[in-house]
Image (cartoon, grey):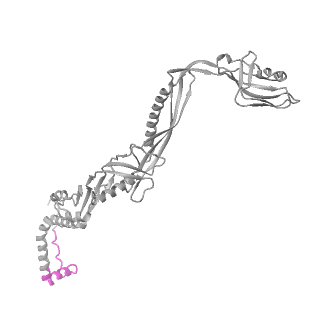
């Protein structure tokens, strides 16, 4: 058309049936018609099952896996029980004899002591008449002889102004003179009478007895002189600390020192010891009164030692535990702690220097913890439903409280095998003072 020649399309040449390219496949199908039928039938079977499998394979898989997990968890099921054992106070009130050297079944004591001092300034409110004698030191000179000269006690010395003094109660030997000079010795002499008029300045003295005896040479060559003034002579009144004031001040200081040493004793004693009430004794060893610079005041000082009886806390606990067992007051229980300790001396007085025994009264309530039978508890709990546990535990007197954990968490019953029930105790439940854990 329109000058373009339309070509005729050739029909495709049909390939021979026995073409080498397709003969295997075809002959396979022909020769194996039954196989082909089976193959087609199998394909139809799979195609008919496949939609069902695609629809349910996930739920089935989940179900299988869940079953396996449940079996595995149940296989590992376990029950943990944490118990708080029952606590009870057991009263103990008894007289106990303590010994310095106790036997095995006896309780011993210890003596503890603290030393200290206390002082205070006190004002004298009383006065008293007082007389005092002046005194001073003189140098006695021997120009009389090369031989030593003896002066007897109470030898009289007269000052240049006429005041009379006497030698003390000891005799004095004056060395003899030598070529180097006269013999000399120092001695203390005292006024013959009290009074301030004897507080004289440095002066010369003669030994009046020689003159009275007519020993003029001795009187002129044995003499004395002082280089410092005499002092101490007085007649009048002075503030006085009476015995009543001194006793009152001493008692107040004793009480103050006792309280202070008692506080120290409580603070410084070791925790292993228990002080016994009424056993404290304050020993005042020294009372010293020293005048102060002001005329009417003085300082009173006392020194003393506070002694007391004590008993070992652990030893006391062991003794009480044994006594309670003997009395049958405890059964299948363990002493946890000794509780509040009240122990006092049951004697009017004691002599610490010779003490070999002492009687005390102990009044206390030790705390005991019950012992629990683990195997019995496991057997009673095995296989119980969680709602039945409280009733079973309430019926066991040795248990105050228990916490139960069941694995896996969704189980509503405890492990059916007692071996799968683990029993433990709250930390510190069985700590004991006897074991050193309290």
Query: Which residue occupies the foreground of this view, 430 or 248?
Result: 248
Q: Which residue lies furthest to the front in this view?
A: 213
Query: At which x and y percent is residue 245?
Result: 48, 26
Query: At which x and y percent is residue 368?
Result: 29, 54
Query: Which residue occupies the foreground of this view, 269 or 290?
Result: 290
Residue 79 appears in the rendering: yes
Task: Answer left or right for 109 relative to 290.
Answer: left
Q: Which residue lies furthest to the bottom in this view?
A: 31
Q: In percent of the image, x 13 and y 79: which residue is there?
A: 38
Residue segment shown in magenta: 9-36
User: On the image, which quarter does residue 296 sit in?
Assistant: top right
User: On the image, which quarter does residue 32 sit in?
Assistant: bottom left
User: On the image, which quarter does residue 67 sit in?
Assistant: bottom left
Q: In percent of the image, x 58 and y 21: which residue is there?
A: 130
The number of numbered badges drawn on the structure is 0
145, above or below 401, in the image: above
Residue 432 appears in the rendering: no
Q: In which quarter of the image is the N terminus?
A: bottom left
353, above or below 423, in the image: above
Q: Is 32 contained in the magenta span?
A: yes
Q: In percent of the image, x 45 and y 55: which residue is there?
A: 101
Query: At which x and y percent is residue 264?
Result: 45, 40
103, above or below 169, in the image: below
Q: Is 288 contained in the magenta span?
A: no
Query: Which residue occupies the foreground of this view, 169 or 315?
Result: 169
């Amino acid at each position: 058309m329109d000058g373009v020649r339309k070509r005729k399309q050739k029909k495709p040449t049909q390939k021979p049936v026995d073409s080498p390219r397709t003969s295997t496949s075809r002959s396979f199908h022909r020769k194996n018609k039954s196989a082909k039928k089976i193959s087609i039938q199998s394909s139809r079977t799979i195609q008919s099952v496949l939609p069902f499998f695609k629809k349910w394979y996930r739920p089935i898989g989940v179900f299988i896996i869940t079953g396996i997990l449940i079996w595995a968890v149940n296989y590992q099921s376990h029950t943990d029980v944490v118990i708080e054992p029952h606590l009870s106070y057991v009263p103990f009130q008894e007289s106990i004899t303590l010994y310095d050297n106790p036997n095995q079944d006896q309780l011993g004591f210890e003596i503890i002591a603290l030393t200290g001092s206390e002082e205070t300034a006190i004002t004298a409110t009383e006065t008293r008449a007082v007389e005092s004698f002046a005194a001073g030191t003189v140098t006695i000179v021997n120009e009389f002889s090369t031989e030593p000269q003896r002066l007897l006690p109470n030898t009289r010395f007269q000052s240049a102004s006429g005041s009379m003094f006497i030698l003390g109660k000891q005799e004095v030997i004056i060395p003899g003179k030598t070529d180097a000079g006269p013999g000399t010795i120092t001695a203390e002499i005292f006024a013959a009478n009290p009074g301030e008029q004897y507080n004289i300045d440095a002066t010369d003295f003669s030994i009046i007895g020689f003159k009275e005896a007519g020993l003029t040479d001795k009187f002129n060559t044995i003499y004395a002189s002082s280089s410092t003034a005499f002092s101490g002579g007085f007649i009048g009144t002075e503030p006085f600390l009476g015995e009543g004031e001194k006793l009152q001040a001493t008692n107040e200081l004793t009480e103050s020192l006792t309280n202070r040493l008692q506080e120290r004793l409580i603070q410084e004693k070791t925790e292993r010891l228990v002080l016994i009430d009424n056993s404290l004794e304050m020993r005042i060893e020294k009372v010293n009164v020293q005048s102060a610079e002001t005329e009417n005041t003085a300082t009173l000082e006392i020194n003393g030692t506070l002694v007391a009886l004590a008993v070992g806390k652990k030893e006391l606990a062991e003794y009480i535990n044994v006594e309670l067992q003997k009395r049958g007051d405890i059964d299948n229980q363990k002493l946890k702690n000794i509780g509040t300790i009240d122990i006092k001396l049951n004697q009017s007085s004691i002599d610490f220097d010779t003490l070999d025994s002492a009687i005390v009264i102990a009044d206390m309530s030790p705390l005991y913890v019950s012992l629990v039978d683990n195997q019995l508890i496991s057997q009673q709990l095995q296989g119980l439903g969680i709602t039945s546990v409280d009733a079973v535990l309430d019926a066991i007197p040795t248990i105050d409280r228990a916490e139960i954990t069941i694995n896996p968490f969704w189980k509503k019953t405890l492990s059916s095998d007692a071996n799968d029930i683990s029993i433990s105790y709250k930390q510190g439940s069985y700590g004991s003072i006897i074991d050193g854990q309290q």
